[in-house]
Amino acid sequence: MSNPLRSLTIAAMVGTLAMGMATPARAALDIAISTVNNPPAIPGDVVASGPNTGPVSFTGTVGGFDIVTLASSSNSPGTPTLAALFGSTTTITNTNAVTATIYITMGAQGFTQPVAPPTLNLISHIGGTVPVSDPENLLTFQSYIDTANGQNTTVGLTPGAQNPNITGGSFNNDKSTTVAALAATYSITEYFAITLSPGSIINFSSSTTLTQAVPEPSSMALAGLGALSMVGYGLRRRKALGA
């Protein structure tokens, strides 16, 4: 191979390698937004990405919706007693001339705790205010735990859809379910479908938590009494046998 051709070949290989190195790895926490795709497509609709704990945030306009500081964070990979994903926004305003819907997902990967039994509690919460009221305003919120560790996936374990009233004023909604022990790395996703009339504004904060169930004090006390009773029975029986 001639020297000029060899130089061109080497340059092409270096360029290809540089392009490959410049391609960023998939982030572990994403915010995706769409007014077309329900749920938003990954990675096409991703507007903010970051490490698994975040925080990540987005401010801008998507499909006629003005968004101010839509943010998310998590405690991935979790602790023995808590895995958590959090979301919030300062405002989302529909500047369209007609009622419209915006779809949002926030997802964090790489949770490895908690996974051990006894029962795990999955709690989904959303609350906020609607400064400009309208009977056409609607909200669907749903939390998911995906044992396949997918990014922003609306599949898996869920307490179900939540539909708080956002026609005006403040709102607050919680939903929970129990989860059997998990055996693999998992992700947590929050899904929002927000319908607003022209000029309507919403702000919210959300959280999805997976916690180990802790026995109530009364249950612990009963368990302690039961253990003491068994000890007392054993001592009485030993004493009777020795008589």
Image (tube, rainbow, N blue to C red):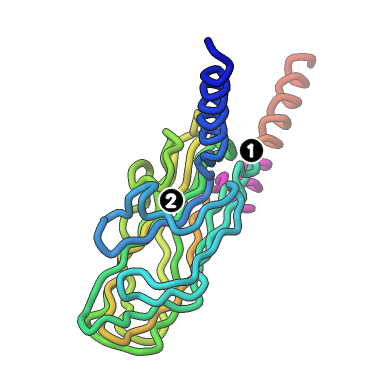
Q: Name the amino acid, label 1.
A: Gly
- Where residue 97 sits in the image (x, y, percent)? 22, 84
Mark 2: give few (<14), some (14-19) or many (20+) Cα within 10 Å. Answer: many
Is residue 21 something that shows in the picture?
A: yes
Q: Who is closer to the viewer here, 98 or 217?
A: 98
Chief secondary structure of the magenta span? helix
> Which numbered disc, 1 or 2, marks the residue closer to the eye?
2
Above or below, 175 relative to 230:
below
- Where residue 155 sits in the image (x, y, percent)? 33, 43
Q: Is residue 160 left or right of residue 242?
A: left
Residues drawn in magenta = 211-225
Q: Does dot 1 land on a helix, a strand or a loop?
A: helix
The residue that label 2 is drawn on is 189
Examine the image and state in which quarter residue 77 appears.
top right
Is residue 214 something that shows in the picture?
A: no
Q: Residue at x 37, y 61 (%)?
A: 33
The residue that label 1 is drawn on is 226
| Label drawn at residue 216 | none
Q: Which image quarter is the C terminus in?
A: top right
Above or below, 150 relative to 123:
above
Q: Who is closer to the viewer here, 51 or 167?
A: 51
Q: Is residue 39 left or right of residue 58?
A: left
Q: Does dot 2 land on a helix, a strand or a loop?
A: strand
Examine the image and state in which quarter residue 57 appears.
bottom right
**Total count of labels:** 2
Above or below, 59 relative to 93:
above
Q: Name the amino acid, label 2.
A: Thr
| Cα distance in 3D space between marks 1 and 2 | 42 Å
Q: Is residue 143 left or right of residue 230?
A: left
Which circle's residue, 1 or 2, is located before the other in the chain? 2
Residue 219 colored in magenta in the image: yes
